[in-house]
Amino acid sequence: MKKILLSLMVLGGSMALFSSCNKIVDEIKKNINPFNYNAPEVTYTLPSLISGGDEYKSEQTYDLNINQIIDDNISELNVSIDDISKITISKITLHLENTNENHNWTNFEHVTLKANTDKGMAEGKADLTATKTIEDKDSERYTDKELTFADHNLKDYVNGEGSKAIYSIVAKARRDIDRELKLVATIQYSFKP
């Protein structure tokens, strides 16, 4: 009888210790600071011979390993996508290269970036869409354009490993473009534990 009672006490103590350790880890995870991740630049080559009124459309796909991104930023703890409450695209900056007086941002009426993932598309989730209207004035010619998405959470669009981010661009020409331009998108993600 004493052996059974002693065994139950040891088992109970072990469970209490394990439960306490889990609570400590949970408390530590609650105090993890949000962080940002800059994705690799996405480059689109806008061909020459786009006529005014035409739209240029292109799509780029990139690997997005969320657990690796988390590990690279919070390596002290065993944190995964399950410990993250919100993932957003916090900032998109568009830079136009190979511009000149006649070929610059004012050649475009607007530019739209759409983002999704392979998982999001397979599950029928809507694209995240951000559009920047470009006025036809000198101050718009060479300045980078920033786009923001409405409030969103990409957590349901990705899995921990092996997701593909899909970025689509649409640029509507205001005037003819007879020289190749490169549009470079810098995309920043924010992670909130």
Image: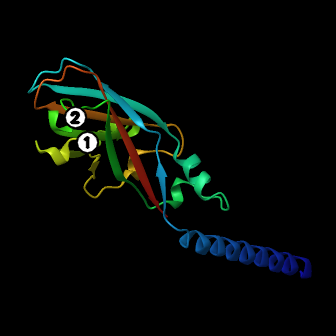
Q: Quadrant of residue 151?
A: bottom left
The 10 Å Cα crowd at callout 2, few under 14, some 14 to 19, many 20 or more, is some
Q: Helix or strand or loop: what does disc 1 sit on?
A: loop
Identified at 27% across, 32% down, the residue is 99
The 10 Å Cα crowd at callout 1, few under 14, some 14 to 19, many 20 or more, is some
Identified at 37% across, 35% down, the residue is 166
Identified at 80% across, 77% down, the residue is 8
Q: Is residue 108 visible?
A: no
Q: Helix or strand or loop: what does disc 2 sit on?
A: loop
Q: Residue 54: x and y, percent?
A: 12, 25
- Numbered mark located on residue 142 in the image: 1
Residue furthest out toward the front: 101
User: Residue 162, relative to residue 2: is it above or below?
Assistant: above
For the residues marked 2 and 1, what is the alpha-carbon distance in whole angstroms? 6 Å
Identified at 54% across, 72% down, the residue is 30
Residue furthest out toward the top: 49
Q: Nearer the viewer, residue 64 or 173?
A: 173
Q: Nearer the viewer, residue 171 or 35?
A: 171
User: Residue 62, relative to residue 80: is it above or below?
Assistant: above
Q: Quadrant of residue 113?
A: top left
**Residue topped by disc 2:** 104
Mark positioned earlier in the residue sequence (2 or 1):
2
Indicate the amino acid at tag 1: Tyr
